Structures are given as C-alpha cells and as structure tokens.
C-alpha cells in the first residue's frame, strides 16, 4: 500500500482533511491539480464558524498575520430594502489566494497533480497508480468523480485596490446577487452570483475570474465526499468555507477511527454521510428556502435570530 488515504483536491476541504489525518497518525496525501498561490472565485468572507474551524486547525494566528480583516456586520441592499445586520460574532475577510496557500503549505498536499482515474480492486483503491485503502473526494463543485445537479448560475470574482470597511456589503438585483468585503493588503474582494443568460453583461472587468455552472446538490456517489464535492451551500449563507473545513475534519476523524478498527470503506462512508447530514441539514434547508422563496422575503419577514444564524 502506498498510502492509507488519498484525497482528491488540496484546497480548503482537502487540506483540512489531510492536516487532521496527519494529526491522528494516518498516512494521507492530498493530490491537488493547481499550484498555490492561485486565485479562486469566492466571496472571501469567513463566517464566525469558519474562523472557529481555522482555529481548530491551529492556523488562526497565521491567517491574522496574513492581514485578514475583521468583519462586524452585513449591509444588505435590495429593491426597497437597505439594512445593516450586526453580527453577534465577527467574521474575517481574506482572499482565497492567501487562505488556500496557508492551509496547503505545511500539509501533505502534493501540488500540480491532476487526478484522472480511480479504480477499485480487492478492497483497496488505485488513484492514478497510487494504491490506498481510502479515497476521499475533495475536488469541489465541478469535480469529475461525483455527479451533481447543475443550475444555470455562474460565479464571478475580481479584486479592487481599496478596502470597504468592516461590513460585508451585499446587494440583490435582477440578474443575481453579490458584493464585496475588505481583504488583506488594503484591498477588497468583489464576487457575484449571476444567472447564465445575463453573464456576458458582467464580464467587462479584464481581471474577472468566472466559475460554473454551479451545482448545489450531489447525486449519490461512490466516494466519501467533503466540501463542495459533497454539495454546495448557497453562497449567500457565507458558510461554504466553513463547511469545506468542517466536513474535511469530520471525514478525517471517522476514517482514522475506521482504519484503526479495520472497518470497510462502505461502513466509514455510511457513518460519515449520516453525521454530515445531521450537522449540515439545517444550513442546506435555509439555503434551499432562500433560493425557492426569495432572499427579499427572508430579509423582510425572517426573524432576526434566523438571519444572524445564516452567517454564524
Ligand atoms: C460566487 C461564490 C461566492 C462564494 N462566497 C463565499 C464566501 O464569501 N464565504 C464562504 O465561506 N464561501 C463562499 N463560497 C463557497 C466556497 O467558495 C466553497 O464552498 C469552497 O471553495 C469549497 O471548498 P472545497 O475545498 O470543497 O472546493 P474547492 O475550493 O473548489 O477546491 C477543490 C480543489 O480540487 C482541485 N481539483 C479538482 N479536480 C481535481 C482533480 N481531478 N485532481 C486534482 N485536483 C483537483 C481543484 O483544483 C481545487 O483546488 C462562494 C462560492 C461561490 C461560487
């Protein structure tokens, strides 16, 4: 056996999982197609819960040293609505260029390795020729190893050379929603989610990065999946990064215990999926309700505790 565990993808979910497995004494490696630092379409807002996950990984000091900016409230604008929602616990603003590098560096993440093939034979897996007991899919919302239900929405992102203070700025408009947050280096990260038919209108910025189509729901798959590969949270909840790190650490603890007691892959997968469902069902239901019934209805009639819990 080359390794106990191979993780496909070494961004937030994959790197968090690799770190936790190493801490638990398991021989694991994450294979990442990209090389860090690199940009990524993301709002750059770490909710208070995500900050906690970073602390659990022992990296909060590094993230703060890198210049992450405290975010104390959300300012949300939509037709007929302009509200400021103070956070009970502050979040942080940081670019993915910086954050992903902090998580991957010092972890067992092999950069520049694009995984093409996973085979199963005699109770183990072969990932591009590397034999292992357990495979974990952390390849994100567009990964090739898990099927998802795609929607006609795309994400776009660019940076601006000035900060926007300590608020998460958010607005809703006909073609989508999004906003900006201050990040390290006195800059701000600007990110929108745009309906496919209107995308072209928003690509005028030469620095603009695009991703999509987005896919919120995963279809039942063969592998233990973490982060966006397990299913995306609505970006409005600002909790995708927390979900990525939390599910990565959760899978690591279940897999580490499973390997030690010689559990089968299916047993570990079942246990992980039921715990994942228990932890994330509420947030996913909020995201689904928002998409189905509209964000404006939520902001106008939703109880303050529920609105605050979206970002916590
Ligand atoms: C428009 C938008 C705005 C968002 N804003 C926020 C926000 O403000 N706050 C927040 O918390 N969340 C936000 N999110 C969600 C957040 O970006 C994701 O939930 C998070 O990136 C998921 O991390 P991940 O590690 O699961 O996946 P990813 O970050 O997508 O990483 C997957 C990794 O796998 C690698 N990979 C893929 N295929 C292979 C392969 N075959 N071989 C090797 N490597 C591979 C990729 O290179 C990539 O690095 C936003 C999302 C969108 C779309």
Image (spheres, rainbow, N blue to C red):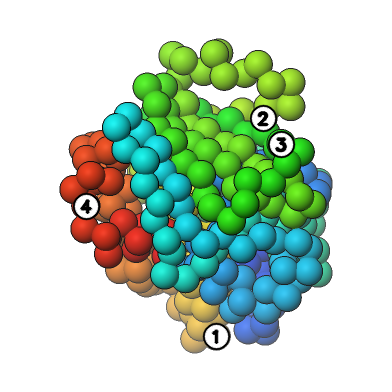
Q: Nearer the viewer, residue 240 or 106?
A: 240
In the rendered image, the vertical position of residue 205 relative to residue 212, given as above or below: above
Q: State which mark lies toward you, 3 or 1.
A: 3
What residue would you read off at disc 1? 260
What residue would you read off at disc 4? 302
Q: Earlier in the sequence, mark 3 or mark 1?
A: 3
Q: Earlier in the sequence, mark 4 or mark 3?
A: 3
What residue would you read off at disc 2? 209
Say if mark 3 contacts mark 1, CB within 8 Å: no
Q: State which mark lies toward you, 3 or 2.
A: 3
Residue 7 visible? The answer is no
Gap in angstroms between the C-alphas marked 3 and 2 = 13 Å
In the rendered image, the vertical position of residue 143 relative to residue 49, given as above or below: above
- The crowd level at tag 3 (other Cα within 10 Å; few <14, some 14-19, many 20+) is some
What residue would you read off at disc 3? 160
What x and y, as percent, mark residue 153? 44, 27
Residue shown at 71% from the left, 36% from the top: 160
Secondary structure beneath label 2: strand
Q: State which mark lies toward you, 2 or 1.
A: 2
> Considering the image in quadrants, where does the N terminus appear?
bottom right
Q: Earlier in the sequence, mark 3 or mark 2?
A: 3
**In the image, is the residue at mark 1 within 8 Å of ligand 1 by its beta carbon?**
no
- The crowd level at tag 4 (other Cα within 10 Å; few <14, some 14-19, many 20+) is few
Quick check: 295 left or right of 257? left
**Mark count:** 4
Q: Earlier in the sequence, mark 2 or mark 4?
A: 2
């Amino acid at each position: 056996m080359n390794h106990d565990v191979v993780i496909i993808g070494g961004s937030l979910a994959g790197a968090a999982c690799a770190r936790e497995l190493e801490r638990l004494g398991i021989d694991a490696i994450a294979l990442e197609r990209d090389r860090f630092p690199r940009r990524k379409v993301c709002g750059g807002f770490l909710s208070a819960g995500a900050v906690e996950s970073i602390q659990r990984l022992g990296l909060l000091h590094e993230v703060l040293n890198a210049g992450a900016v405290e975010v104390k409230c959300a300012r949300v604008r939509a037709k007929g609505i302009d509200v400021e929602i103070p956070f009970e616990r502050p979040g942080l603003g940081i670019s993915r260029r910086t954050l992903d590098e902090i998580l991957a560096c010092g972890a067992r993440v092999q950069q520049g390795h694009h995984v093409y093939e996973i085979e199963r034979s005699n109770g183990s897996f072969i990932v591009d020729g590397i034999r292992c007991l357990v495979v974990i899919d952390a390849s994100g919302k567009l990964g090739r190893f898990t099927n998802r239900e795609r929607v006609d929405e795309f994400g776009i992102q660019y940076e601006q050379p000035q900060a926007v203070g300590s608020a998460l700025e958010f607005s809703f408009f006909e073609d989508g929603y999004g906003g900006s947050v201050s990040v390290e280096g006195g800059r701000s990260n600007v990110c929108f989610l745009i309906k496919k038919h209107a995308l072209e209108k928003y690509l005028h910025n030469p620095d603009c990065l695009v991703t999509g189509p987005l896919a919120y729901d995963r279809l039942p798959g063969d592998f233990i999946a973490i982060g966006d590969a397990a299913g995306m949270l609505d970006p409005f909840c600002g909790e995708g990064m927390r979900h990525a790190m939390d599910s990565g650490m959760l899978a690591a603890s279940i897999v580490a215990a499973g390997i030690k007691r010689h559990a089968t892959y299916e047993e570990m997968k079942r246990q992980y999926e039921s715990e994942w469902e228990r932890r994330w069902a509420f947030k996913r239901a909020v995201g689904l309700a928002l998409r189905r019934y509209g964000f404006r209805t939520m902001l106008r009639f939703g109880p303050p505790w529920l609105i605050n819990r979206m970002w916590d």
